[in-house]
Image: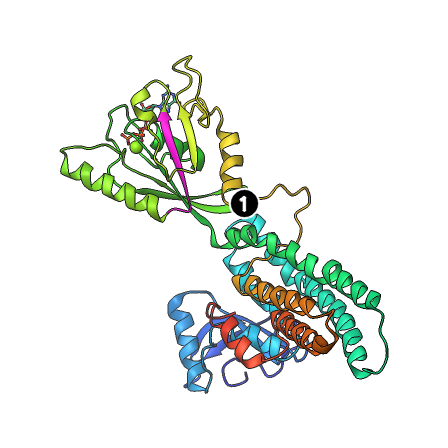
Amino acid sequence: MKRVTTLDHINPRTATLTRWLDKTGEILDEGLALFFPAPGSYTGEDVVELQGHGSPVLLRALLKRLYELGCRPAEPGEFTRRAVENGNMELSQAEAVAACIDAATVRAGKQALRQLQGEFGQHIEELMQQLTGLIAHIEASLDFPEEEIPSLFFEQLSERMQQDVIQPIEKLLRTAPLGERLFDGAVVAIIGAPNVGKSSLLNALAGTDRAIVSNIPGTTRDVIEIDFEVHGIPVRLADTAGLRSTGDVIEQEGVLRAEAAAKQADAIIFIADASNVETWTTPESADILLMNKVDLTDVVCPEPFIPVSVKHGEGLDQLSDILARQLGDMPLADEGLLVTRERHRKILLDAKAHLDAGLLTIFQEAQLDITAMQWRRAWSLLGSILGIGDIEHILDRVFSEFCIGK
Ligand SMILES: Nc1nc2c(ncn2[C@@H]2O[C@H](COP(=O)(O)OP(=O)(O)OP(=O)(O)O)[C@@H](O)[C@H]2O)c(=O)[nH]1
Ligand SMILES: [Mg+2]
């Protein structure tokens, strides 16, 4: 540090004003230096942070100087990886760092924070402890084959396996569709005949005036996308050209794009116009059916259409609830822990398969070693969520998804 700043000494954990110098001693910038000594730093190693004025030119000059002195840029996720390797956090917490950075909504951020604080990891650890106890019972009966073990013993063991390990895993797995959705988001396409109010709906849901609305059928020609959120789920909403056969080549292209957007969407909202029966013919692919402009007529809205009046904001709250549910939202009074990463879901599924397989042989004395083997395999799998086991392999996979500099 002496070679790049003007400091002779720095107190730990204190922001100290300094200047950084180039090779010839010329001042490059002025800023703050912070020193976090091992082992109490983020990575568990000695860490120095330099905070400059943030101008790309000045920062580049500082980086150039640091590279001259033998520094190199961090690999994606390298700081967090070192924190894991030095025992400062377990792997699912490290993944939560990436999740915190990626979180697009407050709800997603809250889940990431719970994971960062180790709640998810602790739950997995508790399951592993339960599993260890049950494996120990099986191992013990394998060690004393001459003992007559009552079948009640295995019945109880299998019951505890169901209650204490398999059922909690199943409960976690049920949260995965919502948990993953909170981070991956969803694409929702609005389709329907011309002039039914598709662009009006996009504007109303996203609270902007993004798409042109007019009473001329065929107003929207292109796919218009906007990002918003429904109950904390990030949604990319796509407004499309009204579906009809037309001689206008530009509109034809718009219709083709509308159909392509609908194909790629996770959910499709189809809109009909209550005042125009010709718009009611519903495509099979639609997930949510809206009957718009109910303010214009007294026609009874046929099932399963949901009556709305986009113009007057009627029925839109109900639409948000239905859309959120369509995207995997669950009614949770107090949001429990969610499985938010595909890696965790796959491991839990795999572990459950091994636990179930172990139960198949538990009442067959000759095959009890298979039960023990299956359950031990499940234990290792759960451990790989926390980073216990083939650590290098797991770390490579997890940190390859990180962004640079964390
Ligand atoms: N009365 C009434 N009019 C509405 C309602 N929703 C939309 N409109 C009107 O219907 C007309 C068409 O609305 P748009 O949102 O442009 O319809 P669109 O489906 O995007 O039409 P295209 O882009 O041409 O396919 C506009 O004049 C809107 O003001 C509603 O709930 N009630
Ligand atoms: Mg439109």
Decide whether residue 269 is among the magenta residues.
yes
Q: At 20% from the left edge and 42% from the top edge, which residue is drawn? A: 253
What is the quadrant of the N terminus in the image?
bottom right
Against 370, residue 195 (above or below) is above
Against 7, residue 262 (above or below) is above
User: Quick one: which residue is furthest to the top in this view?
Assistant: 298
Q: Nearer the viewer, residue 57 or 133?
A: 133
Q: Which residue is mark 1?
A: 232
Q: Which residues are magenta?
A: 265-272
Crowd band around label 1 with a 10 angstrom C-alpha radius: few (<14), some (14–19), many (20+):
some
Q: Is residue 291 left or right of residue 334?
A: left
Q: Main secondary structure of the magenta part?
A: strand
Q: At 41% from the left edge and 65% from the top edge, which residue is drawn? A: 55
Total count of labels? 1
What kind of element bears circle 1? loop
Q: Is residue 5 left or right of residue 162?
A: left
Residue 384 in percent (x, y) is at: 61, 73
What kind of residue is marked 1? Gly
